[in-house]
Amino acid sequence: MSTSQSRRQWLKSSLLFSAGAAAFPASAWAADSPEFSYPEAPEVWMPEREAAAVTIRLNANENPYGPSDKARLAIVDALKLGNRYPWLHTPELVSMIAKKEGLKEENILLGAGSSELLAKAGFAFGMAAGAQVISANPTFMSLMRYAQVAGAKWVPVELTAKYAHDFDAMEAAMKGENNLMYICNPNNPTGTLTPANDIEAFCKRVSKHAPIFCDEAYNEFLDEPKKHSMVHLINEGYPVMVAKTFSKIHGMAGLRIGYLMGRKEEIEKVAAFDGRGMTLAATSVKAAIASYQDEEFVKECLAKNAAVRKHVCQGLENMGIEYIPSYTNFMMFKIPMSTQAFIGEMQSHGVGIRGWEMKGGPWCRVSMGTMDEMDGFLAALKKVV
Ligand SMILES: Cc1ncc(COP(=O)(O)O)c(C=O)c1O
């Protein structure tokens, strides 16, 4: 059995086990058919990215400053209740999020990282008959991969020349009754921003026919996060879902906690796989509660990230390397060799990065580490290019 086949088999059996066979008709598993294959996303994946040789990890858009001191203390404090399920703490976090976002508790679903919510949404919407998920390309692929396993088709739509979503083309790609739109803003891997007005107009026009999943994992890195968020559309009654995470600005990627916001209808659909928080760790929930209130820590991370990003832009300019101005904690730049070769070369200098084929050429995506780490990265880059 091939790896992808066995993975599908595992997903199928674990879902059947956790949710009851009756909820998943055999027709939902078109992915099991022998003709099934994944359309290739343009990322150049490097299995060796976890290799011991990598001492400067700039390949996963992690925040090098987290978790905050307050989150660390909260984790220690939570240990004494480690024998209990996390339900003692989840209502507090849910109500904090609801209050800050102007929503009701019923509009919030927690997950073990936003990845869990992308997965559940991918399955929930992807298993409908003839389902399509329409997204920009390149973008963050998690939801589309799960939707494809559930039997949906992924329809990639090239980013515009300004690396924004091409909403006319995304709308034109709709077919049949079951389309889901995935919008990642700012977009990973490009670090670029699609104007909020354009997204809002698209959501208002199109969500009547196709629900929309807005992935706002990097929203807090923007100067005016609220202005760029689509959360307000939920209260206005649009079938728009918004995912956020504690992995990025809160520096808690290893603690696995994120949240999805949406109307009760969409939240219930995604929570059907399990909305009780059985995948959450009490320690992570307590850390999230502490970090969510720690405005000082967030401010500090933003300031450091902005300073580091400026320094890296300057370094790239000094070497005459073309880059895409970024709104996030990562950025893309053009490389003069194949992505595979470049990743290997950088790794031999201890630096982990990622590569993409984009608009016909090889690109590298580098995450913003500490100033020292980025000096290490720039020094390695000088030797490689
Ligand atoms: C756009 C985007 N969404 C979601 C995630 C998943 O984050 P997590 O599962 O850690 O919340 C990532 C991780 O890199 C991301 O880049």
Image: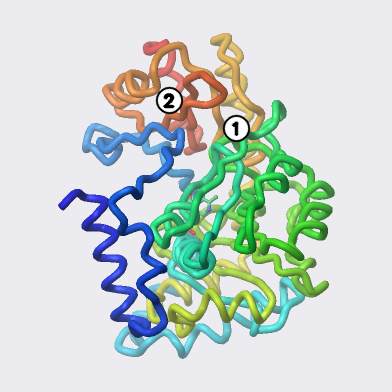
Work out whether residue 113 can be spotted.
no
Residue at x 48% of width, y 32% of height: 366
Q: Position of residue 196 (x, y in %)?
A: 79, 49
Tag 1 residue: 309
**Residue 370 placement, left or right of 164:** left
Q: Label 1 crowding class (10 Å Cα cut-off): few <14, some 14-19, many 20+?
A: many
Q: Which of the 4 image quarters holds residue 350? A: top left
Q: Label 1 CB, ligand 1: below 8 Å?
A: no
SS label for mark 2: helix
Q: Position of residue 335 (x, y in %)?
A: 47, 16
Q: Position of residue 103 (x, y in %)?
A: 73, 78
**Residue 24 placement, left or right of 125:** left
Tag 2 residue: 377
Residue at x 74% of width, y 62% of height: 207
Residue at x 30% of width, y 88% of height: 83
The amino acid type found where label 2 is placed reads: Phe
**Residue 121 placement, left or right of 278:** right
Q: Nearer the viewer, residue 158 or 186?
A: 158
Q: Position of residue 262 (x, y in %)?
A: 66, 72
The amino acid type found where label 1 is placed reads: Arg
Q: Is residue 380 above or below residue 296?
A: above
Q: Nearer the viewer, residue 27 or 358?
A: 27
